[in-house]
């Protein structure tokens, strides 16, 4: 009988559950509501019911051997979800302990999304043969995951690799964290929208983006304008690449990695983003590191990465 | 018979050799000339002669069990010294291989100074019980050493932890590396001298430092002026602390360490430097890390750190 691991992606809008085999194939998947701001025990019971019911369906061919959960503000050391405002389950939710009651014999891992993405890249993606690499996840925010000496870097308290909150511009843009000038404030999808807005404000150039409602213009619209040669949109990607390049060269100085992987929605722009990143890296890189690493697009698909990464947390332990 | 390890510090001005026991005590030490810009084999022979001769003297009580060498531009993976302009021995010197000819049965380690200082702190200093910490060495330059998951971070090519070359000010001061705005350009002893000069240039305040020849004013003079209440000198430390604080909070986001150690000449200023660093850290720290780590002064003495650190590279392997 084949083994499968349940990868669980706990999001504010819903929870996706996928059953992932050893090779990284999702055999079966589905969704349940996340029940935010309610009693977490009721949510956990519904998650358990779903996993038990679906693994029974799969039972003739597959045996459930572990559960990997990804959630915001997850602490992988303690197995708790801490101060997650969008979930509204309280300050410290001992998520792993609560799941263990129902699955006492299975390994259960809990992690945040960006760490799980790094593990997914290592176990199923482009980093299989790498010992030292950096993962940057670009989305509403910017997250990070790190491998050093072939191990995920979790830090002494479980909160390492908050790479979106390194500073790229002292006294720069306001970040969601309350500080100024974080990478996230420039290179998240939201940051890219702000960059476009700044460029529109400082220039008299015509632009397709001037036709948008300010609060409706998204990173995808900027990409589409860029593919049509829109100067403001192209400059937005150029600046995003320069800021990312700046952060990446610092990570290279710190880790001397084999690769820096980029993941997330903005990567759908392909070389419209990656070429400016390369230019940014080449502009700022310390010469001793030239040719020592690659900037790579993650090999995980956006749609599956969370489930694969969360399942990979367990597969990595089982291997 | 007690075991000892030779710690060798290869510097541009001379080579110090110390024989270090398991507890981190230097039993005996001495110096030889470094013979820069000459045939490296002649230098190595003189180093070998010294080690053999002195260990013979120590032989009734001590047995030499390893050699740890620290040198600029050392690659700890390949055991080579690469492109070290001050040594002038050529592009790639296979230092460990050359030493092995004379000591085929002994473990021999090669490392750069800052990494060795981190290992020294771990084996003999304040980081004995820590698994995750950052070491910043402040001197003519700024160096770095990192422990993650209880291991020294060396990177895929042996050149990780160049922490002096993370950016703290985009398009900022010229750094010796040829780029702009590196931490080293602000927080090395040389950087502190530049800061004082900038402050003197921008202000009409009276200052003891105005009595100095510009190219003779050193970090030590700034410290001495600060202890006498000199405003420009105190402000120099304040700014240095702020830049260090900025870099430290980024390292904390990245590593979630137990401590950040500071080492080197400028630390002789004690709280005149450490208090501004604390203020800088508190000003910029992401709130989730509050109370999660300490900024500590290295417990290694400046005079002995290189020898202890280099010997520690070997002791760590032997333990």
Image (cartoon, coloured by chain):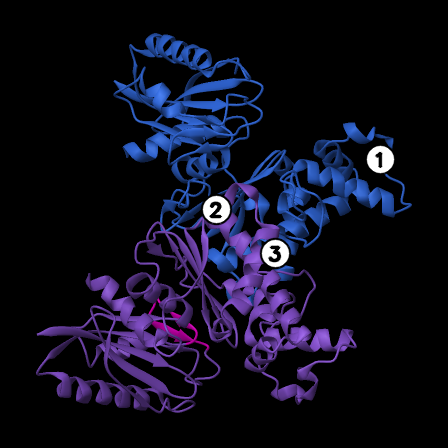
Chain colours: A purple, B blue
A124 vs A176, nearest the viewer: A124
Distance from disc 2 to disc 1, alpha carbons, whole Å, reads 48 Å
Query: Which residue lies under the disc numbered 1?
Result: B208
**Is residue B9 placed above or below B120 in the rendered structure?**
above
B139 vs A15, nearest the viewer: A15
Q: Is residue B70 shown left or right of residue B57? A: right
Chain part drawn in magenta: A72-83
At 76% from the left edge and 77% from the top edge, which residue is drawn? A205
Co-location on one chain, circles 1 and 3? yes
At 39% from the left edge and 60% from the top edge, which residue is drawn? A154
Name the subunit of mark 3. B
Co-location on one chain, circles 3 and 2? no
Q: Is residue B111 shown left or right of residue B199? A: left
Residue A183 x/y as whole percent: 58, 65
Badge 1 marks a residue whose secondary structure is: helix
Name the subunit of mark 2. A
| Residue at the farthest front position | A228
Badge 3 marks a residue whose secondary structure is: helix
Distance from disc 1 to disc 3, alpha carbons, whole Å, reads 29 Å
Query: Which residue lies under the disc numbered 2?
Result: A291
**Is residue A149 placed above or below B36 in the rendered structure?**
below
Residue B19 x/y as whole percent: 39, 20
Residue A20 x/y as whole percent: 23, 75
Q: Which mark is residue A106?
A: none
- Tell me whether circle 2 and circle 1 mark residues in contact (CB < 8 Å): no
Of the 4 image quadrants, the one containing the C terminus of chain A is bottom left
Co-location on one chain, circles 2 and 1? no
Of the 4 image quadrants, the one containing the N terminus of chain A is bottom left
At 33% from the left edge and 70% from the top edge, which residue is drawn? A309
Report crowding for label 3: few under 14, some 14 to 19, many 20 or more residues within 10 A (C-alpha).
Answer: many
Distance from disc 3 to disc 2, alpha carbons, whole Å, reads 34 Å
């Amino acid at each position: 009988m084949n083994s499968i691991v349940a990868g669980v992606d706990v999001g504010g809008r819903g929870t996706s559950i996928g059953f992932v085999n050893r090779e990284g194939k999702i055999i079966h998947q589905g969704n349940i509501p996340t029940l935010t701001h309610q009693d977490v025990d009721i949510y956990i019971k519904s998650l358990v019911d779903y996993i038990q019911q679906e693994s029974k369906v799969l039972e003739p061919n597959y045996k459930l051997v572990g559960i990997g959960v990804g959630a915001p503000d997850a602490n992988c050391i303690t197995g708790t979800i801490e101060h997650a405002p969008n979930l509204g389950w309280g300050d410290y939710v001992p998520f792993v302990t609560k799941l263990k009651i129902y699955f006492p014999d299975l390994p259960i891992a809990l992690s945040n999304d960006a760490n799980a993405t790094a593990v997914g890249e290592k176990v199923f993606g482009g980093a299989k043969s790498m010992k030292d690499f950096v993962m940057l996840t670009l989305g509403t925010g910017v997250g990070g995951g790190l491998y050093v000496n072939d191990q995920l870097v979790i830090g002494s308290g479980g909160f390492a690799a908050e790479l979106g909150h390194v500073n790229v511009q002292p006294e720069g843009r306001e970040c969601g964290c309350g500080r100024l000038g974080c990478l996230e404030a420039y290179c998240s999808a939201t940051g890219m929208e702000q960059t476009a807005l700044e460029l529109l404000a400082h220039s008299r150039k015509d632009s397709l983006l001037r036709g948008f409602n300010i609060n409706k213009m998204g990173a995808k619209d900027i990409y589409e304008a860029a593919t049509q040669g829109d100067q403001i949109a192209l400059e937005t990607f150029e600046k995003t690449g320069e800021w990312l390049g700046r952060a990446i060269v610092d990570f290279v100085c710190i880790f001397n990695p084999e690769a820096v992987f980029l993941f997330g929605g903005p990567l759908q722009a392909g070389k419209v983003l990656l070429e400016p990143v390369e230019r940014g890296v080449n502009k700022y890189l310390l010469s001793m590191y030239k040719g020592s690493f690659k900037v790579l697009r993650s090999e995980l698909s956006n749609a599956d990465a969370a489930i694969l990464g969360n399942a990979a947390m367990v597969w990595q332990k089982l291997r």
